[in-house]
Amino acid sequence: MGHGLGLTRHCGLRELALGFAGAGYRVLLFDYRGFGDSGGEPRQVISFRKQLADWAAAIDYARSRPEVDSSRIITWGFSLGAGHALTAAVRDPRVAAVVTVVPMFDGLSSTLAAVKRWNPWNFLRTVARGTKDLIGSWFGRSTTSVPLTAAPGELGLLTSADAHPGYRALVPSDFNFDTAARIALLFWTYAPGLHLRRFSRPILVFPSSVDQINPPGPTLRRVRRCKSATIVELHCDHMQAALEPNRSRLVHATLDFLNERGPSAQLQ
């Protein structure tokens, strides 16, 4: 199980994992390099390439465990992590099924949703910081940061009315809200949903009809082209998907999906 933009395994994943573990599944939570409990320098840098390498390493580690059936690996991701969960499965044909929650399948639409809430001054500040950070990374300079979230009108990547309260509802008190600003310039380039047209293994998708962070329209258009997809639509703010009562619904719907369409991952 991997989390979303800048989040760690301590941000609501444990509670979801306990629901799956209680049903007999073995669950592996992990932090991306440079975040949370994982090592790596520089810290707080979101790199699609490196995070996908972390997914591959997590899958390999799970397969190495004696209590795990290596033919029944399932990837589960939230938001950006959902895009990674799909991409990791595409790259690893032995992954048996995928579960995605409020998925980031189209970086361009998610970027546009964020940018339209920035005022002109904060747009210029974010682009300037992103440019400085990106160019500085080429020369080994220290990162230039931007807040992951902020209140509407303030400087931050995600400034919809639900974003900052939603993050605060999930994160621990010592959570680091800063991230390397280069991601503001690069996020639009990532479109994991393009894989769906040819994806044939079972995939469960939980889009939200009112998601202001990952707009549901582009997600649903891509998912409906995938013949192996099961859609369970939510009606909640983006981050609320990981909180009750939606959390229980996610767990129950996922277990039903895996019992009906996925591999039996329970130990016999």
Image (cartoon, helix red, strand yellow):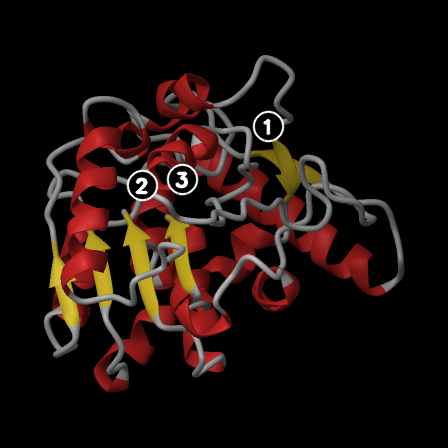
Asked if residue 143 lies left or right of residue 94, the reply is right
Residue plotted at (55% across, 57% down): 67
Residue plotted at (81% across, 55% down): 136
Are the residues flagged by discs 2 and 3 in contact, CB closer than 8 Å?
Answer: yes
Residue in the foreground of this view, choosing between 108 and 70 = 70
Give the mark toward the camera: 1 or 2.
2
Asked if residue 175 lies left or right of residue 91, the reply is right
* Comes first in the chain, label 1 or label 3: 3
Residue plotted at (38% across, 70% down): 192
**Mark 3, residue position:** 21
Q: Give residue 23's mark.
A: 2
Tell me the element at label 1.
loop
Disc 1 from disc 3: Cα separation:
29 Å
Task: Tell me if residue 103 comes above or below residue 16 in the rendering.
Answer: below
Where the C terminus falls, by quadrant? bottom left
**Mark 1, residue position:** 177
Q: Quadrant of residue 99?
A: bottom left
Q: Give coordinates of residue 186: x percent, y percent.
A: 54, 61
